[in-house]
Amino acid sequence: QVQLVESGGGLVQAGGSLRLSCAASIRPFSIATMGWFRQAPGKEREFVAAISESGGTTYYADSVKDRFTISRDNAKNTVYLQMNSLKPEDTAVYYCAARRGWTKKATTFAEYDYWGQGTQVTVSS
């Protein structure tokens, strides 16, 4: 059974930074496309970032481009989301997601087979 466990969320002031981590039990981790999505209260879950198996390809939502960076360490079975210059509108529960193999639709919620429980990120103004 595949498990994804997020960590690193919390409360931060606008302009601050956080780094989220997602430890995955999927084996081998190197074949998994990994993604981050978020869901704010009263809103639908939205794509944030995705990274290919090797880390050579990344996608970002326009709203986070140049502020967030997705990366992965295949030796540690972990994907990261470095979030800088945080804004109050980044407040949401952030979810890690995984699927086996690459997809050109890596920005799409339905393309992922496995999901974490989520970690809360709150940005105060």
Image (cartoon, rainbow, N blue to C red):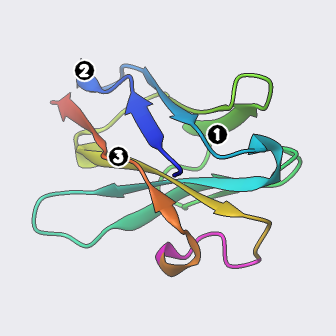
For label 3, the crowd category at 10 Å Cα-Cα, with few meaning under 14, some 14 to 19 and many 20 or more, is many
Residue nearest the viewer, comparing 81 with 63: 81
C-alpha gap between disc 2 and disc 3: 14 Å
What residue is drawn where x is 83% and y is 54%? 57
Q: Which residue is labeled 1 in the image? A: 70
- Please, is residue 46 above or below residue 123 in the view? below
- Using the image, tell me which numbered label, if any, was put on residue 88: none
Instruction: Tell whether label 3 touches label 1 (CB within 8 Å).
Output: no
What residue is drawn where x is 55% and y is 69%? 112
Tag 2's secondary structure? strand
For label 1, the crowd category at 10 Å Cα-Cα, with few meaning under 14, some 14 to 19 and many 20 or more, is many
| Image quadrant where residue 44 sits | bottom left
Tag 1's secondary structure? strand
| Image quadrant where residue 54 sits | top right
For label 2, the crowd category at 10 Å Cα-Cα, with few meaning under 14, some 14 to 19 and many 20 or more, is some
Q: Main secondary structure of the magenta part?
A: loop
- Please, is residue 60 above or below residue 6 in the view? below
Residue 22 included in the magenta stretch of the image: no
Q: Which residue is labeled 3 in the image? A: 94
| Mark 2 or 1: the one toward you | 1
From the viewer's perspective, tell me whether residue 14 is left or right of residue 16.
Answer: left
From the viewer's perspective, tell me whether residue 24 is left or right of residue 12.
Answer: right
| Mark 2 or 3: the one toward you | 3
What residue is drawn where x is 25% and y is 20%? 12
What residue is drawn where x is 19% and y is 70%? 43
State which region is magenta. Answer: 104-109
Tag 3's secondary structure? strand
Residue 108 included in the magenta stretch of the image: yes
